[in-house]
Image (cartoon, helix red, strand yellow):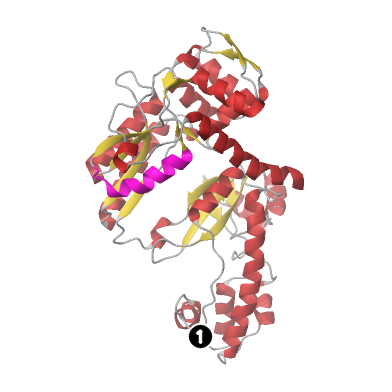
Amino acid sequence: MIDLHTHSTVSDGSDPPERIPELAAEAGCSAVALTDHDSLVGLVAARKRAAELDVTLIPGCEVSCRSVGKGGMHVLVYFVEDDDGPLSAELTHLRIDRHHRNIRLADKLASMGLPITYAEVVAEAGREEGIGRPHFASVLVKAGAADSVQDAFDRFLANGRPGFVPKSRLEALDVARLATASGGVAVLAHPYSLELEGADLAYFLVHGMAEGRGFAAREKIATANFIRAARRQGVARVIYLGGLYPSGGLSAHLESRREVGLMLIEGTGALAVRAGVVVGSGGASFDILYGLCQRLPLMIAPRWLASLCQPVSIDDTVRCLAGAAAIPGGREVDLVGPDVLTYRAMLEITGFELRGRKPVMFPVPFLSPELSAHWLRLVTKVDMNVARSLVASLRHDLVAERPLLTAELGLTPAGFRESVRTALAERRRVLVPRMRAA
């Protein structure tokens, strides 16, 4: 058993960080994630205690975002550390803003004649770090200004009430990008709190191959759950981002993409977007290309490097997904760039843009998919489950066979070389400041 969503006194929890692994052990959990609001500062203490108890600690946080519905929106980020990474730096800015917001909130409530001071709120929370509106509500209850915490929110603290003071919030997409740039994974927290009743549009972006064996069955379960939720909420349009697949003899990865798309078409009338290899900084496919070209000026060339594919840039992918809301669903369309290339050609172009020369390759036709996956994992550090699934799919030629989404939207996609240059520039923009700070 594991628990992937806990808070400590660093934010709005009731126990200190080191107590979280203890509670997990007492409950029989083998792993626990510490996910304090907008903060990673409790990880050191929690990790030390987790190691003593032989409990796996998953480092993380919960980031408050601008909502897309009537309710609040939060994103959980896992596998990130309290270091000088992009997400950690942004969380520092958010904590500073929250501190100033809390002082303004105390002043505003006092100006309304309510019996509250900032010092009392700090005393209620036990420390300035992690103060939130629940602490203000508790002080108001103790002072007799409210009957309960919920009453304090309903009368004074909730959005739209007279004592409400907003705080800075990130867009969910920005959190996802920061998480990826920091080596983490972003997940939507308590989605039903968004209050999305009557939503017109939903995107299905769930893929589970990083979870290893049995991922296809889990993807089907997730898809079925989504279909039920979409029907219950009356979602009018669904767009699914899947992948290109040929006919017959598919790998488990591609077969799952195909089945999920067909389930969504049948269950929700979705538009199933079959994308080529998506090229963008932080994505698994580009990270593999980058890792191979960065570390191996000389490399072996498995047979699958001769397979054809039709890559598309991440920027074009985002633009097309946004535009897809305006075109008819209930069918499959393809999202690809203009270039049909072998994987070998993609490596040569990436190597030239990265190092000014193409990598030298030696054909090794007998290298099995499993050995290829281990080779990629060793050289590029990509997740082994992802490497295994991707390599099993590389024996196929993956080119467009359905109507082109870019043509229906009137967009001209970028070529592969331009996409690589953009991805390399983004990688340098994110990573170079981090290296200088270190």
Q: Which residues are magenta?
A: 314-329
Residue 21 sits inside the magenta stretch: no
Q: Is residue 116 above or below residue 336?
A: below
| Residue at position x 56%, y 43% in the image | 180
Q: Which residue is mark 1?
A: 146
Q: Is residue 292 above or below residue 109?
A: above
| Residue at position x 42%, y 40% in the image | 317
Residue 323 sits inside the magenta stretch: yes
Q: Is residue 216 above or below residue 48?
A: above
Question: Which sits in the foreground, 53 or 324?
Answer: 324
Could you tell me which secondary element the residue under label 1 belongs to?
A: loop
| Residue at position x 65%, y 64% in the image | 95
Q: Position of residue 36 (x, y in %)?
A: 60, 58
Left or right: where 322 falls relative to 151: left
Q: Amino acid at mark 1?
A: Ala
Residue 25 visible here = yes
